[in-house]
Image (spheres, rainbow, N blue to C red):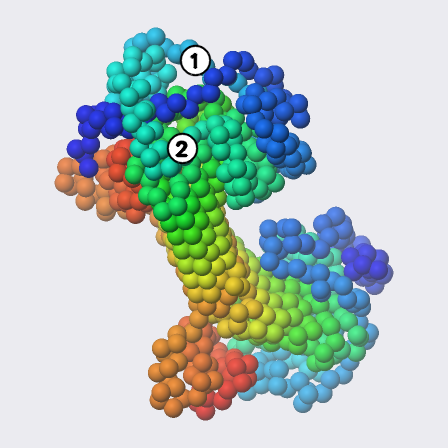
Amino acid sequence: MELKDKLISSFFAFEENVDVNSDIHNIRSAAMKNFESLGFPSKKEEDWKYTSLNSVLKEDYSIFPKKEDAIDYKDVKKYFIHDIDTYTVVFIDGIYSSHLSNTTHDKIDVCLMSSALTKDKYKPIIDNYFNKIAPATSLNSLNTAFSKEGAFINIPKNTLADKPIQILNFSTGNESALMLQPRNLVIVGENSHVQIIERHQSLTENSVFTNSVTEIYAEKRAMVDYYKIQNDHSSASLIDSTYVDQKGESNCSVHTFSFGGKITRNNLQFFQNGERIDSTMKGVTIIEDKQHVDHNTLVHHIEPNCESHQDYKGIFDDKAVGVFNGKVLVEKEAQKTNAFQSNNNILISDKATINSKPQLEIFADDVKCSHGCTIGQLDEDALFYMKSRGIPAKEARALLMYAFANNVLESVKIPELQKRINKLIANKLNVNLGFDL
Amino acid sequence: MNKFTEDDLKKELETKEYEYGFYTDIESDTFPVGLNEDIVRAISKKKEEPEWMTEWRLEAFRVWEQMEEPEWANVNYEKPNFQNISYYSAPNKKPKYDSIDDVDPELLDTFKRLGISLDEQKKLAGVAVDVVMDSVSVTTTFKKTLAEKGIIFCSISEAIKEHPELVKKHLGTVVPQKDNFYAALNSAVFSDGSFCYIPKGVKCPMELSTYFRINQAGTGQFERTLVVADEGSYVSYLEGCTAPSRDENQLHAAVVELIALDDAEIKYSTVQNWFPGGKDGKGGVFNFVTKRGLCEKNAKISWTQVETGSAVTWKYPSCVLKGDNSIGEFYSIAVTNNYQQADTGTKMIHLGKNTRSTIISKGISAGKSQNSYRGLVQINNRAENARNFSQCDSLLMGNKCGAHTFPYIEVKNKSAKVEHEATTSKIGEDQIFYCNQRGIDTEKAIALIVNGFSKEVLNKLPMEFAVEAQKLLEISLEGSVG
């Protein structure tokens, strides 16, 4: 059976386990209808020109995993940022794991989407925010139709989240192939601040297909730092869609570190609904083998005096394929916009491919918008210089790659996370530089 | 530059050809509207084409029937009804006006400002011209010079008859019949166009130009151009006209194919200033052009274009860099005003080793117009050491227009170096203030700044075009400020 048909029939089974009289149910059914008519995206669509899901869709995925699996903390400790105190929300095969998590309702809500969707006290919030900014693309609709579980983070007005929040999605591989559809909602009130780290990790080599949707709302003067670590097995594919709605004077940044996975597609969109907003999106991609990472970004400048910064770096080895499709859209009301976009790539192998499409659509005249895109190699002279001073070739190359990715790395605001990412890169490049960069 | 006066132009007119005997005497009147195989056959018959050419056209027509009109471009227009067009009409030999006094004074004023000589003004406006110059002798000298060098420069219909082996060998090799919707249409029904062949090692002594035969009505709509530069040769080809051309055909679908064999160089410059539609956005020409060049080893193709006219422009002059060490260049200025829409850019396909390409695109949008750059740089995996530099700058005037950039970059070789830069901005108030302060009024100041902005491209145009193009920019943007 085709995955699409399987999902459609699974939806009936899904309906039996949820309250069909709630408002959410209407949203879900409408979304399912939309998915039914759209189907999975194909390469014929402009947004999917360079990324084909065919190899992912042909697996026979289980849609509903069996009950919660116990995992020992010691087995998965390495995937946590464990050297600092954090709130954690952990899902195993899409099901909340209470013994690994550390949630709270004290001042701030760090809890579960399932309770937010069903409990009456959250109803006004859900009515206001749930599924309001995620565009009704086929994959988003599919996620909405099956939306049930995920992280729910609600930071009220004038509150500082006292520690970072980690969202971890583990898959155990108890099913031969599993499809997961986490749905996260993050609301950050006026003058509030939060830092979030998100990671998807499979624990075995069994196929996993994750279709994740995250909606982030930053109210006036809110500050949100969101970090995504994508370092999964080569059998795991991820479609990670993140939508950020910003109000006046808020400041939001999303960092994406992609080092693994089979096919990773990041849809990241910022909507600036207010003045003097700052939006930042940065990413480092280092992949090899047949890995495929696709960054599809949009910054929608709707009101005047806002800024946006995009900085994506990519290093591609073997037969890896990198895609960057960044779009800056400036409406005619959005005068005095400053929008910058840069995409730099290094190809290490002759079989690696990079497809880049930095796009500007501008309707306002008093703006400063620029984009730059480069594709090149490591500087031979610099390599020679280092080799002549006794630094082995491998290390010399790694040093240059660090330098290349550095302005993204150094804007990570959690030092422990920065260290962790440095380590991941060192592992990835198979070097030990003997010092922390 | 300003010294280029009417006298100079007149002199040039005398030294160069303006009526280069491109007329094929056609007796029949207009064909009935609509398009089917019979019409295609009839066109071919009318042009006394050999059997293979008729078949070639039919093949294109059959493909075209299966195709759909593309919709991906960033333009909006009411689609032409292809069954509502007459695909063949005899050139109108009767002059439109009897005397220059009958011509729209606004048009004459524009001519004057562009520095076009009186005789030529008449020609362009379609006024009956008393032949002042001895055109016969000019034609002879001109033809003689080219013939001595072995250069063939004639209409494509003539070439099909006189040089079938050359046409057969090259036609459709760069832009195949089924390349795209408009190219297929053109292949099926093309009425006429130019053919140019430069033999081995020959440097064409003059700029080949279609400029002076603008009065060739009826060939413009589905024009087909084929330029073949044999090994080691050089040619500079000029197309179009800076003067506003009041063409009645709404739809233009031309195809241009350039072939530069080993060590050859082709420089192709275009100035396009067709009727852009009224200030309210009504009317205007739809310009859907397919232009592509093929570079063999060490060859070079350079496209330069100044696009100021047409209501809708859809045009991507491209280079296929097949041979090692070949070079592709694209320099473009696209100006849109009022309700004009332009979706233009280039494709650079790097196949050979050490291939290089440069793209400089300047877009200027004013009024309520939309101006898009759409380009593709593709480095294939065998294209070692390929190099590309692209720069796309947009200038916006007023907040009712839009500027868009859609660059596609696809790289499959690690030794490639690709750089792409794009900026969008408006004319700085301090720049205008600086000019005002020195007694230059705002309108002039804008012209000055726009000229500076486009300088990199204007410099690439042949001299006589550059001067006019500069003035053309000024006129196109008139009244867009304030």
Q: On the picture, is A375 further left or further right than A319?
A: left
Q: Which residue is drawn at 82% across and 74% down?
A: A66
Image location of residue A302, percent across then percent down: 47, 49
> What residue is at 28 percent from the left and 33 percent from the top?
B468
Circle 2 SS class:
strand
> Callout 1: helix, strand or loop?
loop
- Where, quadrant-wise, is the C terminus of chain B in this rendering? top left
State the CA–CA distance, disc 1 to disc 2: 23 Å
Between A177 and B263, which is closer to the camera in this rendering? B263
Looking at the image, the residue that sits furthest to the front is B148
Q: Do we see residue B341 in this rendering?
A: no
Instruction: Identify the amino acid type marked 2.
Output: Phe
Query: Compared with residue B172, is residue B250 higher up or lower down, i.e. above or below?
Result: above
Disc number lying in front (1 or 2): 2
Q: Mark 1 lies on which chain?
A: B
- Please determine whether, in this image, residue B450 is positioned above or below residue A22: above
Give the camera-side residue of B237 and A202: B237
Q: Which label belongs to residue B93?
A: 1
Q: Nearer the viewer, residue A320 or B51?
A: B51
Q: Residue at x 54, y 44 (%)?
A: B173
Tell me which chain the residue with mark 2 is part of: B
Q: Are marks 1 and 2 on the same chain?
A: yes
Q: What's the residue type where badge 1 is placed? A: Lys
The answer to whether residue A375 is above or below residue B258 is below
Q: Would residue A392 be found to the left or right of residue A198 on screen? A: left
Rendered image quadrant of residue B444: top left
